[in-house]
Amino acid sequence: MALLSLLFLLLAIFLGFVRKMNTGLLCIAFALVLGRMSGVSDAVIMKGFNSSLFIMLLGVTYLFSMAQINGSLDLLAQKVIALAGSRVYLIPVIIYVFSIVLAALGPGSVPTMAIMMVFSMSLAAEMKISPVLLSTLTVLGSCAGGLSPLAATGIIGANLCAEFGLTGIENDFLLNGVFSFTVYAVLVYVWLGGVNELELASSITTISHVAAISPLSTGGALALAAYASAANANQKQQQNLFMKMFGVSALGVSVLCVFSYFGMFHWLL
């Protein structure tokens, strides 16, 4: 029966592609047929249909379909890309980040790919950017954002885990996915020439060293511990020093991020 179930699933997918039939409705029909063959009543089979999940997916998909049809999403994408201005090297980064955000808001992976892919390929042709780079980052960003608890993949994943008693994983599920996809996206970005390697190394190294001033890092923690020991500082004094060191670190990181955004390391090359 397990093998027959798999064959019915493959048949539903095949008919969906070849005959343009609704794969979901075919799967429901095949499920009823398999139930009859196994001696399971139709009522029991239909109880397995998750109506709350269906309504949630239907509502989110309907909302963003309207936003896509009336041009709101396309206009938003164009406005976001305009932020890069003449800084062409930022276009792949913006494409990736915006794909994540857009997919996470509800459309999910596939609709976001459909929205962003045409736009990113137009940018690739117009601005002489690698189409492989932009297409890859569009797909990776869409897939990462699709793990959001508001998107189809994230909703399905969370519901399936909840059935096994694993709850409260929505945020971790999303963050793990975004982190994994981002690591690969950075490698693709560097490999396909999205940024000068020296520029990227300079940005990362400089900003990370400034972040080391924070007491949450090794260098900052050593400084805080050494001062507290030498000055015999009480808890209030230590907290005050902690906040000041953290503020200096945060300010430095923010300033260097702004400089990097406006191409400081790019100008110096």
Image (tube, rainbow, N blue to C red):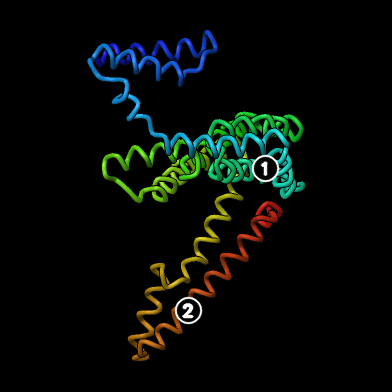
Instruction: Say which element carries label 2.
Output: helix
Residue at position x 64%, y 33% in the image: 115
The residue lying at 49 percent from left, 14 percent from top is: 16
What residue is disc 2 on?
A: 243
Quadrant of residue 262 in the image?
A: bottom right
- Disc 2 and disc 1: Cα gap in Å? 36 Å
Name the foreground residue: 62 vs 76. Answer: 62
Give the residue type that dot 2 points to. Answer: Met
Left or right? Give the position of 133 relative to 124: left
Residue 56 position within the rendered picture, expressed as x and y whole percent measured from the top left:
48, 39
What's under tag 1, amino acid-wise?
Ile
The quarter of the rendered structure image containing the N terminus is: top left
Instruction: Estimate the x, y position of residue 228 in percent, counting from the top left.
Output: 36, 85
In the shown orientation, is residue 57 left or right of residue 227? right
> How crowded is the residue under tag 2: few (<14 C-alpha within 10 Å), some, or many (20+)?
some
> Is any part of residue 12 visible from this angle?
yes
Residue 109 in the image: x percent, y percent? 53, 34
Q: Residue at x 37, y 75 (%)?
A: 222
Residue 190 in sight from this viewpoint:
no
> Foreground residue, 231 or 174?
174
Neighbor class of circle 1 (other Cα within 10 Å; few <14, some 14-19, many 20+) is many
Q: Position of residue 151 (x, y in %)?
A: 50, 40
Residue 239: image tag = none
Find disc 1 in the rendering and name its residue: 91
* 111 lies above or below 101: above
